[in-house]
Amino acid sequence: MEKLIRYHVIARGRVQNVGCRFFVCMEARNLGITGYVENLYDGTVQMEIQGDPVKLTMLLDAVRKGNGYMRVDDLDIKEIPVKPGEKRFGMD
């Protein structure tokens, strides 16, 4: 069984109204990562991502690079408890 970890991530920069949530969702699903992504009222994007540590690193690297429209100035990443049985990645 693979090791799972979960991160709570806040992305700061030009991350709203530029396709960030859709980009994160598609990348996460392609990597088999579970969790969710949502916009926050302060202009940041929040996500919880869960999966294999190597795949989480790949997702975070993709988020830092962006989709050509978004600009990520900072990622605040904290490890949090795993949610057993989580099956999908959602977008709010």
Image: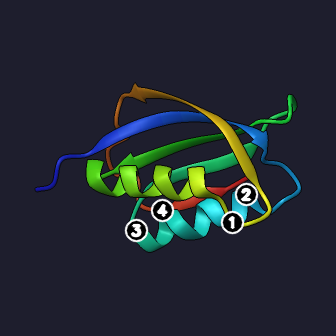
Give the mark nearer the N terminus: 4 vs 1. Answer: 1
Dots 2, 1 in contact, CB < 8 A: yes
Question: Mark 1 to mark 3: distance in Å?
Answer: 16 Å
Q: Amino acid at mark 4?
A: Arg
Residue ID at (84%, 59%) = 18
Camera-side residue: 82 or 15?
A: 15
The residue where tag 3 is placed is 31
Task: Name the element at disc 4.
Answer: loop
Asked if 4 appears above or below 79 in the picture, the reply is: below
Question: Mark 3 to mark 2: distance in Å?
Answer: 16 Å
Dots 1, 3 in contact, CB < 8 A: no
Task: Name the element at disc 3.
Answer: helix
Where is residue 86? Give x, y as percent. 40, 52
Task: Name the element at disc 2.
Answer: helix
Nearer the camera: disc 4 or disc 1: 1
Label 4 neighbour load within 10 Å: few <14, some 14-19, many 20+: few
Give the mark nearer the N terminus: 4 vs 2. Answer: 2
Residue 32 badge = none
On screen, residue 86 versus residue 77, left or right, reads left
Q: Amino acid at mark 2?
A: Cys
Where is residue 20? Give x, y as percent. 73, 57
Q: Amino acid at mark 3?
A: Leu
The residue where tag 2 is placed is 20
Give the mark nearer the N terminus: 1 vs 3. Answer: 3
Residue ID at (58%, 70%) = 26
Question: Mark 2 to mark 1: distance in Å?
Answer: 7 Å
Q: Amino acid at mark 1?
A: Asn
Label 1 neighbour load within 10 Å: few <14, some 14-19, many 20+: some
